[in-house]
Image (cartoon, coloured by chain):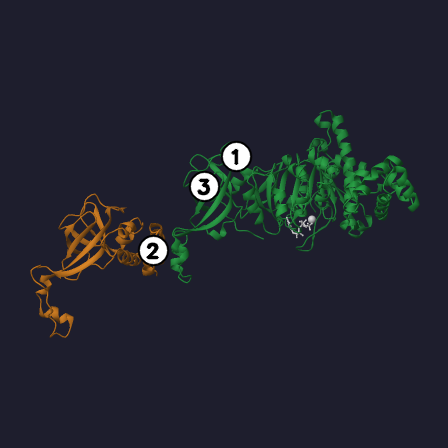
Chain colours: A orange, B green
């Protein structure tokens, strides 16, 4: 699932991509990238699925069906009428090998292809922790949950996940020195 | 007692402070708050200078009150570990004392610190090279007395500076004063900078001292430097029982006891002022043999003498009774076999240390003070004569002499310090090439003026606040030193400050025992003019 969709909305801090296939996008907290030239890196911060046609309301269809799967099998048009969107908070960009954990000069363009980062790319990007602040400061998202999910999944990409989490935790602690309850809440979500 | 070697380890960064209050360092890296000790020497790498200082305090800080009100559950080691050093961290207070050249090895000697290091300067434990830069390397005047806290490095005293003033070693009983004094006497022998006359109350300096550790015995100075130490004794039987080789048995003539000596014994003999003061008219009356003549008198004669001399009868009778105690001393005789002062001076002039053992009189302060005062007075007189006769010709001046006394506060308490020879020696510095090394457990008992003349003070553990005050009186940075002093280990750790060191420092005193005899007993170079046959035999055996 390396490439999974295209950007349909873009701004300096967040972008939204529509997945090519219903429900087939990366999970909350995953690192994704888009764009050519500098590759913009984002953390999946919200996933929505809904109708593509604002004029048509979605109605229940499974009263007579045995399972959820069967609902979709009986109504193949759903795959066209519905779509999954993922929103990503931008946490930096990469130029070649160089990792920059601050906003790119311009956001990715509409229709830019969006890819899920490989474990190697994830490990390379999360080598430093300056990006944490871009997540903790993001508005209108469940920032703490996103961050916790991001660190959990990134940990799995590092050779020593426990050590990674400890270093990440310490970096986060320095960002949240004046809000220890919040720090604690996040740490409880990531502890190995 | 091995200690971890922290040499050169990273401690943290400067995050604040002032010259008066010291520098605040946030502990970082692997430095655990629990490992950082008050008194540890550190270097601060500033923009233009390297600073050398001491840790004076260690504290725990939290960025947010919640850390204190709702600390992480102790079992949650992940959160605890994350918080450690971040939201909850340690700080160390560092007092910068000296400025070192920025690059080690660059010329320029340490200067007093008059500025503070820049923000975020990095702080490390001092390295052995830093310590050597500050305290000197062992050479013909620098003698290693121990190592700084938790560092395998040598702290040296500048012994040439040391013997230029009177000095003190203070500490309560059992802290290691005598061991340290003996070590310094080894230093003087090694560097050949001065002779010493030790009034050795407990017979522990010359031959076979006792130790609480190991076999129970340690070698004395003569065992390390056989041909450069003379053992004198007041109690030849005691020496024989211990198989200690004696060079000279000291006998003292009654006629050598002066009223001043009696004045000093006021306390130990429990004499009233009137009784003690009566010694002077007695001497005027009887002449040099006053003590002998006075002691021969019987009851009625004493009363009539009192009337003749216009003295209080009771006071004189009391003086008589108390002085009768002196007759029990076998070393006090009518006609001594030789002149101990001449013998001592001869040994000293040869460059020897002279250790006078008191043998069975070890717990008898009266004997100790009487003999020490009497001999020191007469030796000092001779030094004054020699020095004046030399007319400024250095080569003809007497060799510097250090007189070592224990229980020093008895000799130097404010009541008697002005009258005794020891008060005089302390005050006149080394005008006549004689200085004191006072070893004492009650420094608060020492006259403050005398204390102010003490050039280098070495304090081992002290409990009593008055003693701590006395030792630190008149010293800059007393607050930090007090905190370092309060934290000394009960044995073999000392705070050293004064003339012979460029800055105060806490040291773990060098080990004196089986493991170190070889290096301690190594002879320093003798000056050619002082060559002496026996010296060649001083190979450590
Ligand atoms: N530098 C040292 N090397 C080896 N042992 C030491 C040293 N310093 C102290 N000790 C140990 O501590 C014990 C006490 O030391 P020391 O006799 O010097 O104490 P002190 O202060 O002179 O006591 P007091 O006031 O009773 O005379 C010694 O017997 C020895 O075992
Ligand atoms: Mg002692």
Confirm or deny contact between disc 3 and disc 1 (CB under 8 A).
no
Which residue does the numbered mark 1 point to in the structure image? B112
Question: Which marked residue is nearer to the observer: mark 2 or mark 1?
Answer: 2
> From the viewer's perspective, is A123 left or right of B243?
left
Q: What's the CA distance linking mark 2 and mark 1?
A: 45 Å
Query: Quick check: B470 above or below A170?
Result: above
On the image, numbered disc 3 is attached to which residue? B17
Report x, y in % for residue A183.
34, 55
* Residue B245 in sight: no
Check the residue under mark 1 and report the chain it is in. B
Depth check, front residue: A174 or B446:
B446
Is B64 situated left or right of B146 in this image? left
- x and y, in percent, of residue B1 in the image: 58, 53
Q: Quadrant of residue A71?
A: bottom left
Residue A183 is labelled as: 2
Q: CA distance from mark 3 to mark 2?
A: 29 Å
Mark 3 or mark 1: whose residue is earlier in sequence: 3
Depth check, mark 3 against mark 1: the one in front is 3
Distance between mark 3 and mark 1 Cα atoms: 18 Å
Assign a secondary structure to mark 2: helix
Name the spot of residue A151 as percent of width and height, x first: 30, 56
In the rendered image, residue B106, in percent from the top left (x then y), is placed at 49, 33
């Amino acid at each position: 699932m390396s490439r999974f969709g295209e950007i349909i909305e873009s701004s300096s801090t967040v972008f939204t991509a529509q997945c090519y296939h219903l429900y087939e996008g990366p999970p909350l907290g995953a690192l994704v990238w888009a764009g050519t030239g500098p590759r913009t890196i984002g953390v999946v911060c919200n996933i929505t699925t809904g109708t593509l046609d604002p004029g048509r309301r979605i109605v229940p269809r499974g009263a007579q069906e045995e399972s959820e799967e069967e609902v979709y099998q009986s109504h193949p048009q759903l795959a066209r009428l519905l779509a999954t969107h993922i929103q990503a908070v931008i946490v930096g960009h990469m130029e070649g090998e160089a990792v920059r954990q601050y906003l790119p000069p311009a956001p990715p363009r509409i229709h830019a292809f969006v890819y899920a980062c490989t474990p190697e790319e994830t490990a390379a990007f999360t080598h430093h922790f300056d990006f944490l602040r871009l997540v903790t400061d993001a508005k209108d998202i469940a920032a703490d949950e996103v961050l916790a999910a991001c660190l959990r999944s990134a940990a799995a990409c590092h050779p020593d996940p426990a050590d990674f989490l400890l270093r990440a935790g310490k970096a986060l602690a320095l960002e949240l020195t004046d809000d220890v309850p919040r720090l604690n809440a996040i740490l409880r979500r990531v502890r190995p | 007692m091995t200690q971890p070697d922290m040499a050169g380890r990273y401690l943290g960064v400067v995050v604040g402070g002032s010259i008066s209050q010291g520098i605040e360092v946030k502990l970082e890296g692997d430095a655990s708050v629990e490992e950082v000790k008050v008194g540890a020497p550190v270097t601060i790498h500033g923009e233009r200078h390297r600073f050398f200082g001491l840790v004076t305090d260690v504290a725990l800080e939290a960025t947010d009150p919640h850390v204190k009100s709702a600390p992480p559950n102790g079992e949650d080691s992940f959160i605890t570990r994350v918080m450690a050093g971040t939201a909850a961290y340690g700080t160390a207070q560092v007092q910068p004392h000296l400025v070192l050249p920025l690059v080690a090895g660059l010329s320029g000697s340490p200067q007093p610190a008059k500025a503070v290091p820049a923000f975020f300067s990095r702080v490390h434990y001092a390295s052995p090279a830093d310590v050597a830069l500050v305290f000197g390397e062992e050479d013909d005047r620098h003698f290693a007395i121990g190592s700084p806290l938790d560092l395998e490095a040598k702290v040296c005293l500048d012994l040439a500076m040391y013997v230029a003033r009177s000095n003190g070693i203070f500490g309560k009983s059992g802290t290691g004063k005598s061991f340290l004094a003996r070590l310094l006497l080894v230093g003087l022998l090694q560097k050949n900078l001065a002779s010493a006359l030790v009034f050795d109350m407990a017979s522990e300096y010359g031959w076979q001292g006792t130790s609480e550790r190991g076999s129970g015995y340690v070698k004395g100075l003569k065992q390390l430097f056989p041909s450069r130490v003379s053992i004198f004794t007041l109690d030849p039987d005691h020496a024989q029982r211990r198989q200690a080789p004696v060079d000279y048995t000291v006998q003292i003539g009654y006629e050598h006891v002066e009223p001043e000596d009696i004045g000093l014994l006021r306390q130990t003999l429990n004499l009233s002022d009137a009784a003690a003061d009566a010694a002077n008219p007695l001497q005027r009356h009887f002449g040099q043999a006053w003590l002998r003549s006075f002691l021969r008198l019987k009851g009625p004669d004493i009363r009539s003498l009192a009337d003749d001399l216009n003295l209080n009868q009771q006071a004189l009778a009391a003086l008589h009774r108390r002085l009768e105690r002196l007759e029990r001393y076998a070393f006090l005789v009518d006609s001594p076999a030789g002149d101990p002062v001449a013998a001592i001076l001869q040994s000293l002039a040869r460059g020897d240390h002279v250790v006078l053992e008191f043998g069975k009189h070890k717990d008898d302060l009266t004997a100790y003070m009487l003999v020490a005062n009497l001999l020191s007075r007469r030796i000092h007189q001779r030094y004054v004569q020699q020095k004046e006769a030399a007319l400024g010709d250095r080569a003809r001046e007497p060799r510097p002499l250090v007189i070592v006394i224990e229980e020093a506060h008895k000799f130097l308490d404010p009541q008697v310090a002005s009258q005794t020879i020891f008060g005089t020696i302390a005050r006149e510095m080394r005008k006549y090439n004689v200085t004191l090394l006072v070893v004492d457990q009650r420094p608060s008992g020492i006259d403050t003026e005398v204390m102010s003349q003490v050039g280098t003070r070495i304090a081992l553990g002290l409990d009593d606040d008055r003693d701590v005050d006395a030792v630190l009186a008149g010293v800059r940075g007393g607050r930090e030193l007090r905190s370092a002093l309060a934290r000394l280990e009960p044995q073999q750790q000392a705070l050293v400050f004064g003339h012979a060191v460029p800055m105060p420092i806490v040291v773990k005193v060098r080990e004196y025992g089986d493991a170190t005899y070889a290096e301690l007993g190594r002879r320093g170079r003798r000056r050619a003019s002082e060559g002496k046959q026996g010296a060649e035999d001083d190979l450590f055996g």
